[in-house]
Image (cartoon, rainbow, N blue to C red):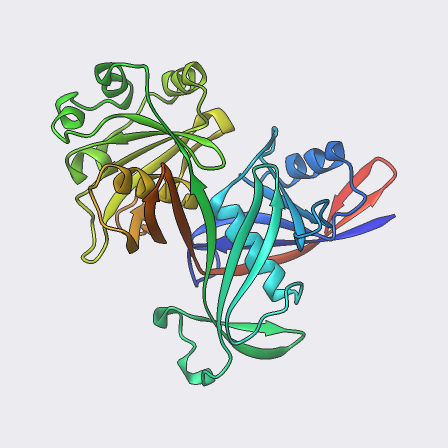
């Protein structure tokens, strides 16, 4: 009999049961891929990760990503949730300031930076203040300011589909795409994503895509997700507002995708639409409960654009998974 610790962690938020949830299963060494998939199907969360010892000597842990139906290479919000769980369980040694950890994934080695203030007073830990207390074994060790995940975007290619066809699938006028003066492109940053620029915020928030046809288009183009964005954000101080669709992954719409935000940021840098630096990108359909992803973009060097994305997370529930013979029990 084996016992696994499962934490439901809500990413891109400081409030439990908000943000974008992911199941994180720790200490998954010795568990076969088949059993991981069965557990992910049993949990029936949109995304689950499994943490085990790495194969790469430079990495601290290996992280694998699953939907209820299949394994995939990388997810931004699930990675953020996993990093928070590792910190909360004391599975990464954190110091005051910035601590870097390397994680092994099917998309390669991913550097992650933890920003921790070990000198903060407890009275400063308010969700609205933008930090969360990091408590390990009942002891508060500091205020976690943010977790930032590094990605390299190194593949840009034109989407071989007319903008009119994409507009019909999204249910918007083709002119909303054309007037931006920006191309519809495919970007690879761990996963392949279709990036669609749209002129007005109202068009993005009101659109109701034909997700079956979008799935077929994604399959035709060889991409896993579609990110539709506008440079008209909802909130002051933000750079973009976007919606993230993943029908090819069994997730019709995702309200907070770090990988999606990172790809949009790299796209904008590549086209000179924004300057390198720190930015906040809004995502989601409900304008009253938008997710906000922190993104920091470096210079475009020989077609490689370095991007960091992240924010904070919080654990909403902790459960135990018992494996005995062929049975999986979630307690």
- Residue at (59, 64) in percent of width and height: 87
Q: Is residue 192 left or right of residue 207?
A: right
The answer to whether residue 13 is seen in the rendering is yes
Q: Position of residue 325 (x, y in %)?
A: 88, 38
Q: Is residue 104 left or right of residue 112?
A: right
- Residue at (40, 74) in percent of width and height: 126
Which of the 4 quarters of the picture holds residue 100? bottom right
Q: Is residue 181 left or right of residue 298?
A: left
The answer to whether residue 284 is seen in the rendering is no
Count of labels in the image: 0
Which of the 4 quarters of the picture holds residue 130? bottom left
Instruction: Establish if 220 lies above or below 46.
Output: above
Instruction: Establish if 52 lies above or below 246.
Output: below
- Residue at (74, 48) in percent of width and height: 28
Instruction: Establish if 73 lies above or below 120.
Output: above
Q: Position of residue 210 (x, y in %)?
A: 33, 20
Instruction: Establish if 150 lies above or below 153.
Output: below
Q: Nearer the viewer, residue 106 or 287?
A: 106
Q: Nearer the viewer, residue 222 or 143?
A: 222
- Residue at (30, 25) in percent of width and height: 209
Q: Position of residue 35 (x, y in %)?
A: 75, 35
Q: Residue furthest front?
A: 302
Q: Position of residue 37 (x, y in %)?
A: 68, 34
């Amino acid at each position: 009999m084996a016992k696994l610790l499962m934490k439901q962690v809500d990413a891109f938020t400081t409030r439990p049961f908000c943000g974008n949830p992911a199941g994180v299963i720790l200490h998954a060494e010795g568990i076969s891929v088949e059993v991981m998939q069965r557990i992910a199907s049993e949990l029936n969360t949109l995304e689950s990760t499994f943490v085990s010892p790495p194969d790469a000597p430079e990495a601290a842990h290996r992280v694998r990503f699953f939907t209820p139906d299949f394994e995939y290479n990388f997810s931004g919000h699930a990675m953020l949730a996993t990093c928070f769980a590792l910190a909360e369980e004391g599975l990464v040694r954190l110091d005051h300031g910035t601590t870097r950890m390397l994680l092994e994934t099917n998309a390669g080695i991913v550097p992650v930076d933890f920003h921790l203030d070990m000198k903060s007073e407890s009275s400063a830990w308010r969700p609205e203040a933008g930090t969360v207390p990091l408590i390990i074994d009942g002891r508060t060790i500091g205020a976690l300011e943010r977790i930032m995940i590094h990605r390299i975007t190194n593949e840009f290619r034109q989407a071989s589909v007319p903008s009119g066809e994409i507009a019909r699938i999204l249910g918007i006028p083709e002119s909303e795409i054309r007037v931006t003066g920006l191309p519809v492109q495919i970007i690879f940053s761990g996963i392949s994503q279709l990036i669609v620029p749209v002129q007005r915020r109202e068009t993005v928030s009101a659109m109701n895509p034909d997700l079956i046809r979008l799935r077929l288009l994604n399959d035709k183009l060889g991409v896993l997700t579609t990110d539709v964005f506008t440079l008209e954000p909802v909130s002051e101080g933000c750079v973009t507002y976007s919606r993230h669709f993943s029908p090819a992954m069994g997730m019709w719409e995702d309200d907070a995708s770090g990988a999606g935000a990172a790809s949009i940021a790299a796209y904008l840098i590549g086209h000179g639409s924004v300057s390198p630096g720190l930015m906040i990108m809004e995502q989601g359909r409900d304008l009253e409960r938008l997710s906000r992803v922190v993104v920091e973009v470096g210079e475009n060097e020989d077609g490689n654009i370095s991007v960091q994305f992240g924010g904070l997370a919080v654990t909403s529930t902790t459960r135990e998974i018992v494996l005995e013979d062929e049975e999986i029990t979630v307690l």
